[in-house]
């Protein structure tokens, strides 16, 4: 018998009627955001009605993930046991060119988590971000990398 801690799985998304299209597209490495068919407003968090004009059933629209860095933080211990071997890493608030903001991990060009103290990697507010994808178990997550030019997926 061992007293070693049992590794725990990372939290996973729980899709519902409003978010299932996002997660289905993510599995295909496509980033989709709901947009009102009536007034064109981009909607985030997904919901059944446009918050601007109350039109039902927004259309899921594919976007390229081009973004700017709106904010960021470094995740450090203590964390959930599933993340203990990964910290420290950077969490970003990516503001898509469409105006919606998504939270995600910052990765290097090779897709690995960017492990940093937040000062040595050239992280700066308003930096351009490029969309990447990261597989976490059965899930595919949108993540971002720093980009010197136009951000693309």
Image: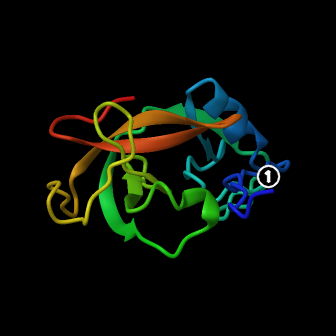
| Residue at the limit of the structure toward the front, as seen here | 1
Residue at 44%, 52% in the rendered image: 105
Q: Quadrant of the C terminus?
A: top left
Image spot of residue 125 (x, y percent): 22, 64
Residue at 71%, 34% in the rendered image: 138
Q: How many discs appear? A: 1
Q: Is mark 1 on a helix, strand or loop?
A: loop
Which residue is disc 1 drawn over?
14
Q: What sort of colour scheme is used for the picture?
A: rainbow
Say whether residue 26 is left or right of residue 71: right
**The one of 24 and 76 positioned closer to us in this rendering:** 76
| Residue at the limit of the structure toward the top, as seen here | 28
Give the image quarter of residue 47.
bottom right
Image spot of residue 3 (x, y percent): 73, 64
| Residue at the limit of the structure toward the bottom, as seen here | 78
Task: Answer whether residue 68 is visible to the viewer in this image.
Answer: yes
117 vs 38: above or below: below
135 vs 101: above or below: above
Image spot of residue 115 (x, y percent): 32, 54
Give the image quarter of residue 107.
top left
Say whether residue 41 is left or right of residue 68: right
Image spot of residue 35 (x, y percent): 61, 45
Residue at 81%, 56% in the rendered image: 1
Task: Answer whether residue 52 is visible to the viewer in this image.
Answer: no
**The one of 38 and 5 positioned closer to us in this rendering:** 5
**The one of 129 and 55 positioned closer to us in this rendering:** 129
């Amino acid at each position: 018998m061992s007293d070693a801690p049992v590794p725990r799985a990372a939290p996973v998304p729980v899709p519902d009627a409003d978010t299932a299209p996002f997660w289905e597209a993510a599995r295909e490495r496509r980033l989709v955001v709901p947009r009102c068919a009536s007034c064109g407003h981009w909607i985030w968090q997904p919901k059944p009605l446009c918050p601007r004009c109350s039109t039902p059933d927004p259309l899921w629209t594919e976007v390229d993930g081009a973004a700017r860095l709106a904010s960021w933080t470094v995740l450090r211990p203590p964390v959930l046991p599933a993340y203990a071997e990964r910290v420290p890493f950077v969490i970003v608030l990516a503001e898509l060119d469409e105006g919606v903001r998504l939270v995600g991990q910052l990765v290097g060009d090779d897709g690995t988590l960017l492990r940093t103290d937040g000062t040595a990697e050239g992280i700066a507010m308003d930096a351009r971000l490029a969309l990447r994808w990261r597989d976490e178990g059965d899930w595919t997550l949108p993540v971002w990398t720093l980009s010197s030019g136009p951000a693309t997926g």
